[in-house]
Amino acid sequence: GLMIAVGLVYAVIYYVVFRAVITALDLKTPGREDETEEAAATSSSDMAGELVAAFGGKANITGLDACITRLRVAVADTAAVDQDKLKQLGAAGVVVVAGGVQAIFGTKSDNLKTEMDEWIRNHG
């Protein structure tokens, strides 16, 4: 019985101490991140336009595809691709392969591909 009581007391102490430290230091625990990411993602057509520009513009893009984590873009000239801009837009990495560029955007890659397709069609 004493072990349970000691355990409950420690649980309360841990909760109070950790909560105080997290709020005092404004630690970014899951669920407490800054809301900049959500705000940036709201204007998806702007994001699509930025991506098209980062891949060297509409004229440079010869094909679009996506797998689970990567946005695969076939381009005419890989030198025209702005890798730093892609990373600023949220790519975890950029891989240049023969005839194209793969930008790692995680699970939103497929959605980005669709938005880029629409952007290219609507800005023809």
Image (spheres, rainbow, N blue to C red):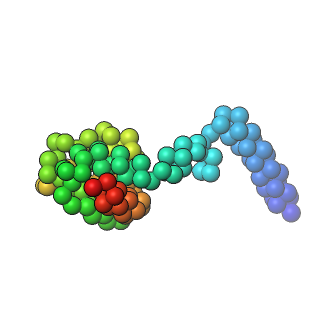
Q: Give x and y (percent) for residue 34.
A: 58, 42
Q: Locate the C terminus by quadrant.
A: bottom left
Residue with the most extreme top position: 25
Q: Position of residue 50 (x, y in %)?
A: 35, 46
x%, y% of residue 95? 24, 50
Asked whether 52 or 2 is in front, the reply is 52
Between residues 14 and 26, which one lies in front from this camera angle? 26
Residue drawn where x is 74% and y is 47% of the image = 14
> Measured along the vertical axis of the image, is residue 63 above or below residue 13?
below
Q: Position of residue 57 (x, y in %)?
A: 24, 47
**Residue drawn at point x = 71 percent, y = 43 percent:** 18
Tell me the quarter of the image containing the N terminus: bottom right
Q: Is residue 47 left or right of residue 71?
A: right
81 w.r.t. 109: above or below? above
Tell me if residue 113 can be seen. no
How many tags in the picture?
A: 0
Q: Residue at x 13, y 55 (%)?
A: 98
Left or right relative to 21: residue 92: left
Residue 68 showing in the rendered view: yes
Q: Nearer the viewer, residue 90 or 2?
A: 90
Q: Is residue 98 left or right of residue 65?
A: left
- Going 49% across and 46% down the picture, which residue do you hit? 40
